[in-house]
Image (cartoon, rainbow, N blue to C red):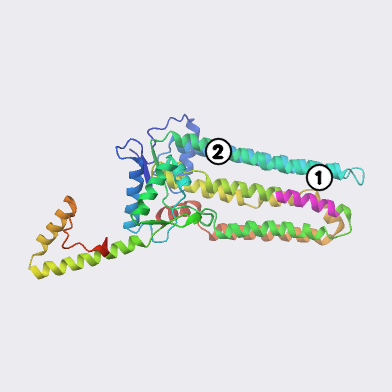
Amino acid sequence: MISIDAASPVPPFEQLRAQLARQIQDRTLAVGTRLPTLRRLAADLGLAVNTVGRAYRELEEAGLIETRGSAGSFVSAAGEQGRERASRAAADYAAVIAGLGIDTNEAIRIVRTALTTGISVSPATHNPKEA
Amino acid sequence: MPKGTSPGADLSVRPADLERAGVWLTGHGLADVRPTALLATRLEVRRRARLAASVLLAAFLIAVALTYTGGTVDGSGDRRWSLLVLTALVVGLVLAQSSLDWWVRRVDRRAGATLPRRAAHPVRLGWRTVLGRPRAAFAVATFAGGTAPAIGTLTLDDPTARYAAVILLIGLCGLAVGVVVQLRHVLTHPVVADDEVSLTADVIMRVEDARVGAAPTAVWSVWSLPVVSVFSTAFGWWNAAWVAFIVLSVIALALIEARTARSAAVARNAMSAP
């Protein structure tokens, strides 16, 4: 279910984008699922078509959905690929942690700090292919 | 906030409507949900629209019967006029049904506009979910079963039987268009919900609207017109075929009702499925 609260300080397009992104990431919306049309979802949620269009556009730029012409918008396989990429990165990180002899709690703390404060990728570790 | 409430809704409803909404919720396995003004308003407009649609269909059948008998008063009759009147009746029926649908959707839209919070499905509910394949196939088969003998009759030499068949075909075409228009409205009108309960209730209403719209009662009614008496006087087997058609379709409908999920179960599945 998607819900839009008009009284919320969060803009409607961001409420919609965040909820759809979460449902795609937690697989509530499976790869290949057809999303409602802009007009249909806008009517259902009492929003302007442009508002829904902006949310869809940002999801598309993030690779979570893809638009196939007049057939509509679908949940993209890129969302699944992104999860696999994150899993591979986590495995690499785990290998580094094991190599350095850092304990698990410390390793989790480092990850949590990075997630909450923002990830800064140094030029030395940045891989252009991953961008 | 209790489940199913709409704090921003400014809908005035009669206590009787709220009571009916409570009974409706209980009948659909939502006994623990408090009936809201939003739900009561939506259910009441549907109740009135269905009543009006039934009266409309009865009036249509009577008018078609009168057109038919009027067209055969003087033996040949001015059948061209009769067919024109009949065509106008069919168009009028479709327009009137569309107006009733428009009225329901307008009330829904106004109710939805009062909601400070709006909820919707992240996926589109299609006809397979709302109506289901068995009912869709049954509706098509019923129309085909009603149409095929009439088309066969057009090949006969008997002008009276052919005239009756044309009237029957026009009536069936009008009903088919009406059903398609109604189903399109059911599938395309916006959701009116502010939480999971009202979203579930919306799907239940959608499923029930679709099932009522696709029910073959109108086809049975059209077939029971005086037109049938022409076939029965001309061909004895028409009566037997007609009775068999009715009996078989009633059995098929009963089986579909028994073997397919109830509207509340369909709604829960739609809510839980991605």
Q: Is residue B141 visible?
A: yes
Which chain is home to disc 1? B
Location of mark 1 (residue): B83
Q: Which residues are magenta?
A: B161-173
Looking at this view, is B104 or A95 the one in front? A95
Classify the position of the C terminus of chain A by image quarter.
bottom left
| Quadrant housing residue B149 | bottom right
Number of other residues with Cα within 10 Å of mark 1, as a class: few under 14, some 14 to 19, many 20 or more: some
What residue appears at the point 54 percent right and 39 percent down from the top-left corner? B105
Q: Earlier in the sequence, mark 2 or mark 1?
A: 1
Location of mark 2 (residue): B104
Secondary structure at numbered mark 2: helix
What residue appears at the point 37 percent right and 62 percent down from the top-left corner? A77
Q: Quick check: A41 left or right of B3?
A: right
Q: Position of residue B46 (x, y in %)?
A: 55, 40
Looking at this view, is A15 or B267 the one in front? A15
Which chain is home to disc 2? B
